[in-house]
Amino acid sequence: MACDPIRRSRPFLQAAVLALLLGGCAAVGPDFTAPTPAQPADWNSWRGGPEDLRDPVSTAPPPERWWETFQDARLDALLVRAREASPDLRTAALRFAQSRLMRQTVAAQRGPDVGLSAGVSRQRQSEYGAGTRLLDAIAPNNREQLVSALSDPFTLYQAGFDASWELDLWGRVARSVEAADADVAASAAALAQARLSVASEIARNYFELRGTRSQLRWLQEDIAAARESLDILRARRDGGQIDALDVSRQQALLADLNGRLAPLRAQEAAAANRIGLLVGQPPGALRDVLSETGDADTAMPDLELGLPSQVALRRPDIRAAEARLHAATADIGIATADLYPRIVLGASFGYESFKDGKFGEWGSRRWSVGPSLSLPLFDQGRRRTTVALRELAQQEAAVSYQQTVLRAWQEIDDALTGYGAERRRNLELQRKLRASGDALDLARARHAGGMTDFLPELDARRTLLQARRDLAQSDSQLRIGLVAVYKAIGGGG
């Protein structure tokens, strides 16, 4: 008798084996093929290449921690603090963690669902329910006695487990896991994009802050020279050597220089506040850290761009766009699988008894096993319309990917062109600074020899200070331009 249940369930077991064999069918829907983005063969053929940059371009991959090439300890410390406390990075990291948990949830559909249930209930059957209706036909003479016995309240004890497993015949679960993996990849790319954006924004604002402070320093020296010139002109006016026009012009020049102080100080405060926001600090919290910035005379790092073919692998936005295209392609397979039937293997085993003394005995057992089939027949085209929508979404993702690649190379071109132009301007400003220094030395020599008065020397000093301010601003813009280049090529690593 022990083998009787197995023998009776043999047809169901055979159907289950057949379903398992069918489970090896290929997943429906299109398979994803990674697109190959258009890219130049080398940087020499690029419009913003070495000839425009006036710098040797190394094809070595840029360093992963590219900001360390600037050799600024304070900048390095700010980026370390941002990694730990930046709200943008924490948000991106939480979204990445959510995508990984969602992937685990989707992947759990591959295995069976097993549940345990138990309960005790007090019940009474209706005297005129469906269960007592047959008594009228079977035993009409003894109906009242039988109904009285059936309708007596009783306690029902139940316990057991249920298991079900959907066979992935058409790859619906496989495509769901594939789409979830793509979503994880997109979230990982978004996290990398957030890290790159935070690092580049901190570096850009830091160099802007450093450049603004250099301009403030040279502007204050220029104001001191203008005041000295004004004192000399006033003395000469009082001596009758010049009229009041020269004094008025110098006063206007001094007022103009003093008027430039407030905007520069506002720029200084704004840059410091932007850095504080990026590292998750309120305004003024980084005053001590940013009280002194790095040396503006540090040499520029070498320009390392790697190979153009590596840009698509480094840029997080391209990787994210490819992952979204992958997920959209897998969604077509999920929607297509819903057009086909589903087979679920089910099994249950437990005990049921209305006598507490018999509960748990072998005679109180109950069980069931067998597959169930669900086949969509008519839904007014809802499932097929869903497939068409997923196909359109995939086409949209493909267009978005192409647009992302085009935007990436536009940003690279803009960054390289801007960096090359600033590099050339910086070289010219260096020549201007050297010429202004020579002019000041000559004016000092002539004044010392009695050939001229002190005014030409003051004018030459003011010209030199202006050249220093311009060069300080250019040095800042040059470093900001290099940061833009690193961001455009996707950072390092």
Image: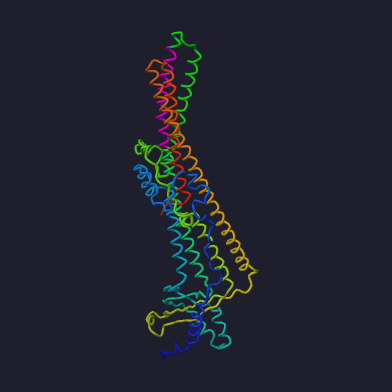
Residue 234 highlighted magenta (yes or no):
yes
Is 89 drawn above or below residue 467 in the view shown? Answer: below
Q: Residue at x 52, y 63 (%)?
A: 34
Front residue of 56 and 362: 56
Number of numbered discs on residues: 0
Q: Residue 340's image quarter?
A: bottom right
**x, y percentage for residue 487?**
46, 48
Which SS type dominates the magenta stretch? helix
Is residue 312 shown above or below 54?
below
Q: Position of residue 364 (x, y in %)?
A: 41, 83
Residue numbers of the magenta segment: 209-235
**What residue is shown at x 55% (from left), y 88% (from top)?**
139
Percent of width and height locating residue 86: 41, 47
Looking at the rendered image, the quarter that the C terminus falls into is: bottom left
Quarter containing the N terminus:
bottom left
Q: How is the image coloured?
A: rainbow
72 relative to 4 in the view: left or right: left
As rendered, which of 61 and 89 lies closer to the eye?
Answer: 61
Q: Is residue 287 above or below residue 280?
A: above
> Viewer-proximal residue, 156 or 96?
96
Q: Give the percent coordinates (x, y) of residue 51.
A: 49, 45
As drawn, which residue projects farthest toward the right?
380
Frontmost residue, 5 versus 359: 5
> Is 54 a magenta residue?
no
- Residue at the outermost top position: 240
